Each structure stands twice: as C-alpha cells, then as structure tokens.
Amino acid sequence: MNTPQHFDSLTDAVDFLYQRLPGPLHVGAPLGLGKPHRLLNALYERAEGDSTRPLHLYTALSLDPPGAGKGLEGRFIGPFAQRHFGDDFPRLRYVQALKRNTLPAHIEIEEFYLQSGALLNASATQRRYASLNYTHVARALADRGVNAIVQKVAADPNGGTRLSLSCNTDLTFDAVDAIVARGLPRPVLIAEVDPQLPWLDGSAAVEADFFDAVVTPPGPYPKLFGLPRQPVSDADYAIGFYASTLVRDGGTLQIGIGTLADALCHALALRHTDNAAYLRVIAALGGGAAADDDAKAPVAPLGPFSVGLFGCSEMINEGFRRLVEVGVIKRKVVDDLEVMRRVHDGDASSDDLAHLEREGEFLQGGFYLGSPDFYQWLRHLPDDQRRGISMRRISEVNELYGGNETLERLQRRDARFFNSCMMATALGAAVSDTLDDGRVVSGVGGQYNFVAMAHALPNARSVLMLRASRESGGEVRSNVVWNYAQTTIPRHLRDVYITEYGIADLRGKTDEDCIRAMAAVADSRFIAGLLLTAMGSGKLPRFTPRVTPHNNPERLRETLAPFRSDGTLPDYPLGSDFDAVEQRLVKALGWLKASTATKGAKIKTVLRALFAPASQDHEALRRMGLDKPSGLGERIEAKLVALGLRESAAH
C-alpha cells in the first residue's frame, strides 16, 4: 500500500477526496460512534455548494443529541444536554437537513439503521431507507459502487504508527473485501483521528497504510457521543429477571441495548453476587413460567456462575461492562479448532488450558456504544482484560457462515440471544422496527441474524423481550396483537417471548399452543379480546375465556415494591448520567407525561396542581428554573412539577 497522506486540516482532507475521485462520490461511513462527525460536516459543506459533484452517503445510526424542546421538557433537557454532550458537539449537518426536509437534491443519504424514532417524519430518510440484515450491508455497499470510506480511529497511546478502528470493526473490513471482490477499485479510505476514542488492539488495529489519508484535526476535541442511561421500570425488571432464568452457566450471551438489557444484566449480576436476593425476586415473580404449562421454557439452574459466560454480541455496551466487572463474563475461547474441540470434549491438556488462559477472549463484538463512564472503563482496562476483548467483523459475530462454522459452534455453546421488539403477534411474529404505515422506527440491524443463528446452533435460544402494553395518545394498548401490517421476524422462526408477566416458549409449537402461550403473558385487559379473535379466525375452539386479573401493572408494582425499597432493584442499576436532583425530576416528569396524555387528564392534573401544597424540593425547582416563577405560565409549570415530584416519590 502507498504511504498515507497526513493532514491536520479537514478542508485539506476533503480536497484530497475530491481530487482522488472524479464524478459522483459514493461514501460509506460507520454506524454510531465511529462516524467522523467533523470530517463528514466538512464534506457535506463542500458538497452542498457544488451540485456538479453528487454525494451519496451510505451509513447507519447517525447519532444526534436531543434538542432542548419547549416547556418542562426543554427546561430539563437543555441544561442536561449542554453538560452531557458539550456545547461543541458537532451535530451532523445532514441530519439537521433531513429533519427539516431540506436536503439538497444532489445529496442522498441512505441508512440501514436509524436512531430510534428520530427520523419518522424525515421524508428523504423514509424513502431512502434500506432494509438490510446487518451481515448483508457489505454486499449492498459493493452493489452501490462505494468508492470511499471515512472512519473515526484511535491513535496508538504508546506512540506507534498503528491506528485502531476501536469502536467500529463491524463493516469496514467486510466492505473493502466485498468491493474488491466485485472487481471494483479499492475504495479511498480516510481516517479521522480522535484522541478521545479508546484504543483497542488485536483485530481492531491496523497499520496506518491501511488508509490512504489520515487527518488529525486540531483540538479542542468534542466529547464522544454518550448514551444517557435511563431508569429501569417495574416491567423492565420483571422481563429482565424472567430472561435471566434462561441463561446457563458456561453458555454464550448476546444482548441488545436499552433498559430491558440493563435489567437483564442487573439480574445476571445479582444472581452471581447475591444469589439469595436474586432468588427472592424470582420467587416473588412466580419463577418465570407462563401460566400455560405447555408454554414453559427450559429454565436453567439458577446458582452463581462458576464457569461463566462468553459474550459474543454485535454491540458491546454498559451491560457487558457490569458483567465483566462482577465475573459473570469470563469464559474464554480461542480461534483454534483443535483446542476448542478438546475443551468441549473435556480432554483439554494443561497446555491447552494454559493457552486458553493466556490467549483466550471472553468478549467479542462488532461495535461499541455507551455512556461516558463506559468509555472511561475501556480507556483504563487492565492489560489482561483488554486482551480478552476482541473487536471483530460483523460477519464473524452475527452469523456462523464466515468460514469458521465448526469452530464457532464449539465456542458459542448454549447460546442465548436476547433482543427487544415493539410488538409480537399471537402466532409468533415480531414487530421490531417499522410502523404499520411503513415508516421505519429503527431498523432490522442484527436481530434476524441472531434469531436465525439460534435455530442453527444446538441448545441455543432466541429470546425476544417486550412490554405487554403501552400508552399511546392517552390510551392503553396491547403489544401482544393478533396481526400487524409490518413484521421483522416471521412466525416460522418463533422461539421464546418474554413480557413482564412471564415466558412463552413457542419453538416447534402449533398455532393453537402459540396463541394460548402468548395470551398467558399478555396484559389481562386484552386477553379475552385476543382469544375471541383467534376463535373467530378458526385458530382456537369455541370457549368462554376466563381471564385472571393477575397480569396488570398494579399487581406487578406491589410485587416488586419491597425490592425497590430495600435497594435490590435500583432505578439506575448500571449507573446514571443524571445527578440526584435530575433523577427525581426524571420520575416526576414521567409521571406528568402519563397523567396529561389526554385532554381530560391534562385538565384534571392541572387543577390538582393548582390546589396542591407548595413543593419543599427547592433544589428540583431551582434546577428547572422555576424556584422564582414569573407570570401565570411559569407558576402553573412550577405547580405541575411540584405535583409530579410528590406523586412520583410516593410510588
């Protein structure tokens, strides 16, 4: 390879790209954290002013901090966003144009995964969304003739010449190989060095000449995008604890992101570090089985982890950090077929075990994303832990068919693939990424990959987690539905579903058995209607549904209240990015949102607030800028916050 060009100017790097590529630019950029915001903004500015050089950008998960908004939400988010993301965070200019629906005609943005719900009303995004399995993206980039890839990288902290792809090894290597295999020129590769990005070695590190150009723009360097950690609800905790009963010691773990994954990781950590407390929660919830005996899933022995788990997940996040810290994620694997075969058969020699301990990896992923604390953890890992974490191609992590299938089958024993969905049908299909009108909320990502892999691996299970109901427009709706216009996972790949009311094991079951199992974990308010619809469709015999009222939020809250009050189930099990005052406000604002969802409820709540006593939480009112309200509007807002603080503190 040629010696890379080095720049300290973003403008010079963009000039280099334009000089190297005549005609339209077809540029790929990593998803999430590895996207070089500053370089992409410089590129967008250049392209915006030159309609003779069309720009096509192919990417995913274009992270954008929340806007301050108006009213109480704005009062809360504005100061938090300023502190958490920094005043100088480089918002992606193309994202702002997409949200305003003002993207120039000669610029096209195509994404295969979206920041959840952020671009529902961006017409160009919805038109140019590409519905792709994660492992098919590299092939699609080759189909589109991508001629450049830009990526954020970390510099060697020891002063070496190598660079680390760090947070995003997922698609770059696969994409370059796919493009070259198609007979196309190797894309121009430009790296933007970010001193804030943690260094990860091994398969994440490359020689600098892997790139054609390296740009190190001057400081100050903006903060890395940090995902604010959200509070875990009672429903989340119930789902997470049920899910934890399916995990076998010595097995393999994949998890997604969000509060359901946070709850699962807290449950696994508690199972290992305080097994008695863990078992008390499980007993209170009823052990995790669904009401229908035919729907019971294979619950694992629920003791602490002796062998430990091997983590193999497209995304490494906060939950994995906790599980590594407490000693749950610790089972090591090596890329040596014969050694893994002997370990599997129980014939490993002392040399094999020494090799496994010395060279083994306990956590493999394709990209990482998390909080500022998570990035700090990665920066300061002890050497032995750093060696145990390996960033891989997505083709290696998300499927079995990348050339080492026999080895990966031995490594990924007793695998449990945990992901979330928005809704599930009574016949076992999952709705995870798209509304019924076709608008995309997020994307397929790797979910289908993991569901399919669970069916391909021996003793593996796919577990899709969802809340049984949701509030929308002031109305409670069931997330267990008869059917839906758009589905992400087809019903012939149905496996395990978990709601806050239990586990439904659908693998290999008849349609009738699936319906009964899903009804058993639905919200009681919707079970009869679901069963009657199934009868009307000829999927159940005629009978009078007898619905017990146990599957409801009030009973769940009562069940978990003792564990909330004694600290077993904290609001923020993996830490919080909100200070103590903000944590109180998050609960208060959540209560207010639920209590003002309809016009009638809003009027009732405002009237209650006006005649309620003044709040003694002066810190919270000061944080909201409402400690000295002026004018009627601010006085009403202060009263509402006071009511929310009092009501949320009582629950």
Image (cartoon, rainbow, N blue to C red):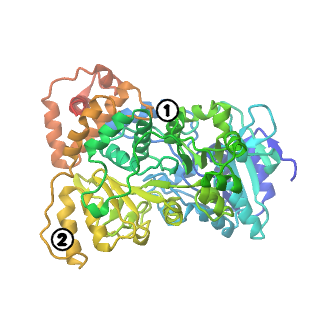
Whether 601 is drawn above or below 441: the answer is: above
Q: Residues within 10 Å of mark 2 (few under 14, many from 20)?
A: some
What is the x, y in percent for residue 88? 57, 34
Residue at image coords 35%, 49% = 242
Residue at image coords 70%, 40% = 354
From the viewer's side, name the closer residue of 505 and 418: 505
Residue at image coords 74%, 62% = 177
Circle 1: element type: helix
- Relative placement, left or right, of 534 versus 427 is left
- Relative placement, left or right, of 36 versus 433 is right
Q: Quadrant of residue 574?
A: top left
Q: Quadrant of the C terminus?
A: top left
Instruction: Of the two numbered discs 2 and 1 on the same chain, state the one appearing first in sequence.
Output: 1
| Separation of residues labelled 2 and 1 (CA atoms) | 49 Å
Whether 94 is drawn above or below 444: the answer is: above
Q: Looking at the picture, which amino acid does disc 1 mark?
A: His
From the viewer's side, name the closer residue of 552 and 462: 462
Q: Residues within 10 Å of mark 1 (few under 14, many from 20)?
A: many
Q: Quadrant of residue 433?
A: bottom left
Q: Residue furthest bottom?
A: 538
The residue that mark 1 highlights is 84
Nearest to the eye among marks 2 and 1: give it: 2
The residue that mark 2 highlights is 532
From the viewer's side, name the closer residue of 330 and 210: 330
Q: Residue furthest right?
A: 2
Circle 2: element type: helix
What is the x, y in percent for residue 531? 21, 68
- Relative placement, left or right, of 108 versus 596 is right
What is the x, y in percent for residue 110? 57, 61
What is the x, y in percent for residue 453? 53, 63
